[in-house]
Amino acid sequence: MTDVGIVGAGAGAAAAAFVVDGTVPDADVTVLEKSGGLCGRAATRRHGDLTYDYGANYLKSDDDRVVELITETLDDEGLVDVTEPVYTFEADGAVSPGRDADGHKWSYRQGLTQIAKRLFGRTDATVHRRTRVEAVRRVDGADGDGRWELDDADGETHGPFDVLLMNPPAPQTAELLRTAEWDDPLRETLAEAVGAVEYRSVWTAVLRYPFALDVPYYALVNTDKEHAVGWISREECKAGHVPDGETLLVVQANDAWSDAHYDDDPVENVASLAGHAAEIVGDERLADPAWTDHQGWRYALPEGGVDRGPVDSARDAGLYLLGDWVAGEGRLHAAIANGLDVGERVAYGI
């Protein structure tokens, strides 16, 4: 039997588990996820009759393998495609058409978390939620081969695992590697490479209104990166997410604003972003939402990829790193594609 341990239950981890479980006949896959949900930043919440994706906004159709996975391999019931375009706005708030080249913009009636739920649902993997990994350890097996053990915050030990996959954002993965009990010069080199990946933070406000907006776009994106707001999208454009005649905006601040206000009073942050949304959209009613939610994403979007040399070398020790930061693109489809790649490498020993 091949024992596979996975830290984190993001989209990449779900894709890797799907491949390994379906390809390696004797694989026993265990997933440890610190939160209560699945799919990482492709996160969905529900509030009464609302369903909303408050992290990643949608899945792009930019990778053929991912398109096939979503539309053919997995059950596509409830898959929804946003047809309204993405417009742009500048620092002065001026809105203009011009960014409708995104192809498909997919979610599900039940939200983006369906991706991980459907992938894990096709496996026999054991998923432990609310289980924070605090220590990684390399141990000698009875046959002389090294294996991996994981200690969680409650003092429980998981493993040993023949193969270990690590899916948290780069800064969190780097910290686990820095403190790992792994007597190999590669550990320090790998931790340094992973720790060098920079991230953008995103502070998000979710704003509900008891009226519909009469605008021709699904979302607005700030192209010059000079406005406090980086993104505004309308969840009502996703079938099944918002009652008819209502509006639910997802307003994401840019990196500089998010860093400066990350630990400020959430009520003040929400009010500020609602005011910005009212000015950008040109509707003063948006400054006074009927209901709100919020979320800060400290490690939202990687600025680039990681040095692949140490990452590739770690595979010799049965250690695989995966995620959008390994792919070098902070997009949901990139994380899934990387997970498929890693799953295949584990399954076929490449």
Image: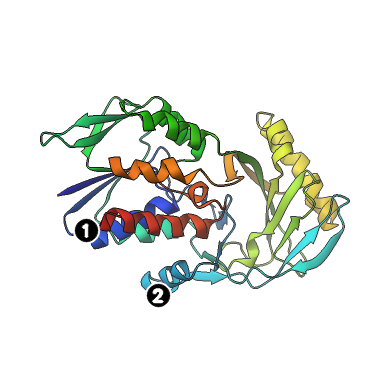
Question: Within 10 Å of the Cα at label 2, are there few (<14), some (14-19), or many (20+) other Cα atoms?
Answer: few
Name the quadrant of the C terminus.
bottom left
Residue at horizontal 10 percent and vertical 34 percent from the top:
142
Whole-number angstrom distance, CA of label 2 to CA of label 1: 22 Å
Question: Within 10 Å of the Cα at label 1, are there few (<14), some (14-19), or many (20+) other Cα atoms?
Answer: some
Residue at horizontal 27 percent and vertical 57 percent from the top:
347
- Asked if one can make out residue 318 in the rendered structure from this viewpoint, the answer is no
| Left or right placement of residue 172 versus residue 256 in this view | left
| Residue annotated with mark 1 | 24
| Element under disc 2 | helix
Amino acid bearing label 2: Glu
Residue at horizontal 26 percent and vertical 58 percent from the top:
348
**Residue 104: image location, x then y, percent:** 58, 71
Query: Which of the 4 image quadrants contains residue 271?
Result: top right
Mark 2 touches mark 1? (CB < 8 Å): no
Along the line of sight, which residue is nearer the eye, 25 or 214?
A: 25
- Sequence-earlier tag: 2 or 1: 1
Amino acid bearing label 1: Val
**Residue 224: image location, x then y, percent:** 80, 51
* Residue 349 versus residue 70 in the image, above or below: above
User: Which is closer to the viewer, label 2 or label 1?
Assistant: 1
**Label ID, residue 72:** 2
| Element under disc 1 | loop
* Residue 51 versus residue 225 in the image, above or below: below
**Residue 235: image location, x then y, percent:** 63, 60
**Residue 163: image location, x then y, percent:** 27, 44
Along the line of sight, which residue is nearer the eye, 224 or 239?
A: 224
Along the line of sight, which residue is nearer the eye, 63 or 73?
A: 63
| Left or right placement of residue 26 versus residue 218 in this view | left
- Asked if one can make out residue 50 in the rendered structure from this viewpoint, the answer is yes
Residue at horizontal 58 percent and vertical 43 percent from the top:
300
